[in-house]
Image (cartoon, helix red, strand yellow):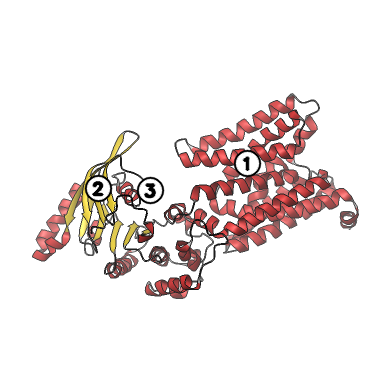
Amino acid sequence: MNIVEFEDVNFNYDNSAILSDINFVIEKNDFVAIVGPNGGGKSTLLKLILAQLSPTKGKIKVFGNKNYKSLEKIGYVPQFITHQSDFPLRLIDMVLQSKLRSNSLFARYSKSDKQKAQKILDRLQIGEFKDRFLAELSGGQRQRALIARALIDDPQLLILDEPTASVDITVEKDIYEILKDLNKDMTIILVTHDVNFVSKYVNKVFCINRYLHTHKLDELESHNAEEAYNNSMKIITHKCGL
Amino acid sequence: MEFFHSLATVAFLRNALLAGILASIVCGTIGSLVVVKRISFVSGAIAHSVLGGIGLAYFLGVSPILGAFVFAILAAVLISYVKQRKKQNEDTVLSAFWAVGMAIGIIFMSKTPGYNANLMSYLFGNILLVSNSDLLSLLLLVIVIISTVVIFYRQFIAIIFDEEFARLKKIKVDFMYTLLLILISLSVVILIRIVGIILVIALLTLPAAISRFFNRSIGGMMFWASILGLVFTILGLWISYVLDLPTGSVIIVLAGLTYIIGSFIKK
């Protein structure tokens, strides 16, 4: 079963085409980087996968299902908007927000929810900070917290929107190492600007600039030729207008 | 000291104090949500559109608080609807609510004999005119507001912190946002008695904003914003009583000064 499948998908907004003729398949345990210029349709593509938008034309299947409402199986990590960095909320309370459901009055979290949260925070090495407020965390810790929040529902697909946009390069590496580890258990899609860095970790690169160009990196690497790899990077950056 | 003696014995001062206590609780709770969600402009639009309801109520000869109540809820629902549609520029729509509501109010009041004094008291509030029946309706509104916040606390925080994520987790974001705006509307109706339409945003946001300087949790913010609101109200009553100044304005000036001092200390 494919995790995500797009068949001739078009998306128009106010009569202008944002995405055209998008065809791709994301398989189990793929690690996909979506790159492309601003306004090229990266976030639209994510929103289509997350069923926050419907395609103008074409078919989208997620987990093999056309009318998927099983969003619990998708973990989503949004960009950490800077104005929220001082939001008066404890790390653990933010992570547990994943366990809120629409109709729970006096929402309480169960003991197992809390244990689960602790386990995930420990795995991401931020367990000791669980009672800290978001303002007291570093950029990298905050980003891990967002990943933890997405992981608490045991997603089979993890989607991240520019997870390393606001962190320095060492933290960026840490985060990709974490994702690489998580990739053993789940399929990962991430949007990024930095195609060169991310290419060491992912197996597919999607360039979106209204149209889609896919690149499979694992096939290239099996030749183990540095030159082929570099050429491929050049093609990616060129086609994506980066 | 004469003032504090009078607080206990003079009915209108006692009512003013009780109204102040109720208003402070509202300021602290709803104000904190307004401050962290950054929607004071939305609150302002709701507050000013309420004048339309007050004017209409005067014209029809029904209770102004009822008119305010109906228009506030109406404004909340419409503003939330506009936000969800995302077709219009929200800023422009809010400004329209702000101005058109006031214009409607003033048209109706001008067609109602003897409107002038009343207009002033709704624009700038008059905490000294709070009657026993006013107090009862204020108390009722406070109970409704506080219990709603308690019931939906975590959902409110979730939609304020990250609307997109909350939507994915199937929290009814649009419903919760409308509910939040309705709570703001109810608060506005309460606070108008104290400081009036023009100053209501200040009383809603300043205590919460000051409280945020020294609180890291939203619960703490709510508690200390309520205490601050109470201090400003009592001090404002006292100073305006001694110096014969308009109470609502004194309360706001006190809150504003504290906010400025607080922001310097925070630096």
Q: Tell me if I can see residue B202 in this picture.
A: yes
N-terminal of the two: label 2 or label 3?
A: 3
Residue at image point 76% right, 26% down: B112
Q: What residue type is labelled 2?
A: Ile
Q: Please tell me the numbered disc located at residue B53.
A: none
Q: Few, some or many C-alpha atoms within 10 Å of disc 1 (few <14, some 14-19, many ≥20)? A: many
The chain under label 1 reads: B
From the top left corner, tell me how far across and down residue B127 is, in percent: 79, 46
Q: Name the residue under label 2.
A: A208
Mark 2 or mark 3, which is nearer to you?
3
From the top left corner, tell me how far across and down residue B75 is, in percent: 60, 38
- Quadrant of residue B51 in the image? top right
From the top left corner, tell me how far across and down residue A87 is, in percent: 51, 59
Q: Do labels 2 and 3 share a chain?
A: yes
B171 lies left or right of B123? left
Q: Mark 1 points at which residue?
A: B73
Q: How far apart are marks 1 and 3 (CA)?
A: 29 Å
Tell me the element at label 3.
loop
From the top left corner, tell me how far across and down residue A34 is, in percent: 26, 54
Q: Few, some or many C-alpha atoms within 10 Å of disc 2 (few <14, some 14-19, many ≥20)? A: many
Q: Marks 2 and 3: CB-CB under 8 Å?
A: no
